[in-house]
Image (tube, helix red, strand yellow):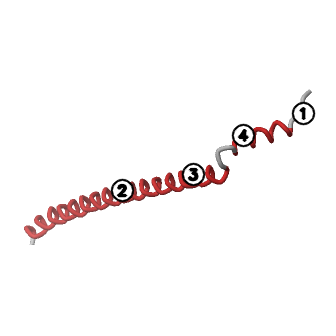
Amino acid sequence: MLQLKSIGTPLVLALALFAMSGCDQAEKSAQQMLDQAAESAKQAIDKTNDAAQQALSDAIGGDGGKAKTEDDKKDTQDI
C-alpha cells in the first residue's frame, strides 16, 4: 500500500503539470485569436473611415473648402 501512495503522488503532480501546460497553450492560442480579431477590427474601421472620408469629399466637391472659408469671412465683421 505504501508503494501505491508513493507512485500516486508524483503521478498526480505530473498530470497537474501537463494540465497546466495545456492551459498555457490554450491561453496563448486564445490571445493570438484575440490579437487577430483586434487587427481585423482595426482594419475594418480604417477602411470604413477611408470610405466615409472619400464619400464626404465627393459630396462636398473640390470647391467645398473654398465655399466654407468664404462663408466664414462673410460672418465676421471688420473692426
- Residue 77: x %, y % from top left: 90, 33
Amino acid carrying mark 1 in the image: Gln
Amino acid carrying mark 2 in the image: Gln
Q: Secondary structure at mark 4?
A: helix
Image-based side of 59 in relation to 6, left or right:
right
Residue carrying label 1: 77
Name the mark on residue 54.
3
Please rate how many residues cluster around mark 4, counting C-alpha atoms within 10 Å: few if below 14, some from 14 to 19, many from 20: few
Above-or-below relation of 31 to 65: below
Q: Residue at x 72, y 40 (%)?
A: 66
Image-based side of 54 in relation to 72, left or right:
left
Disc 3 versus disc 4: nearer the observer: 4
Q: Secondary structure at mark 2?
A: helix
Could you give the CA–CA distance between mark 4 and mark 2, rounded to whole angstroms? 49 Å
What is the quadrant of the C terminus in the image? top right
Could you give the CA–CA distance between mark 2 and mark 3, rounded to whole angstroms? 34 Å
Q: Secondary structure at mark 3?
A: helix
Could you give the CA–CA distance between mark 2 and mark 1, rounded to whole angstroms? 59 Å
Which comes sooner in the sequence, label 2 or label 1? 2
Which comes sooner in the sequence, label 2 or label 3? 2
Which comes sooner in the sequence, label 1 or label 3? 3
* Contact check, label 2 and label 1, Cβ < 8 Å: no
* Contact check, label 4 and label 2, Cβ < 8 Å: no
Q: Residue at x 33, y 59 (%)?
A: 27
Please rate how many residues cluster around mark 1, counting C-alpha atoms within 10 Å: few if below 14, some from 14 to 19, many from 20: few
Determine the residue located farthest toward the bottom in the rendered image. 1
- Residue 19: x %, y % from top left: 24, 64
Which comes sooner in the sequence, label 4 or label 1? 4
Disc 4 versus disc 2: nearer the observer: 4
Name the mark on residue 66.
4
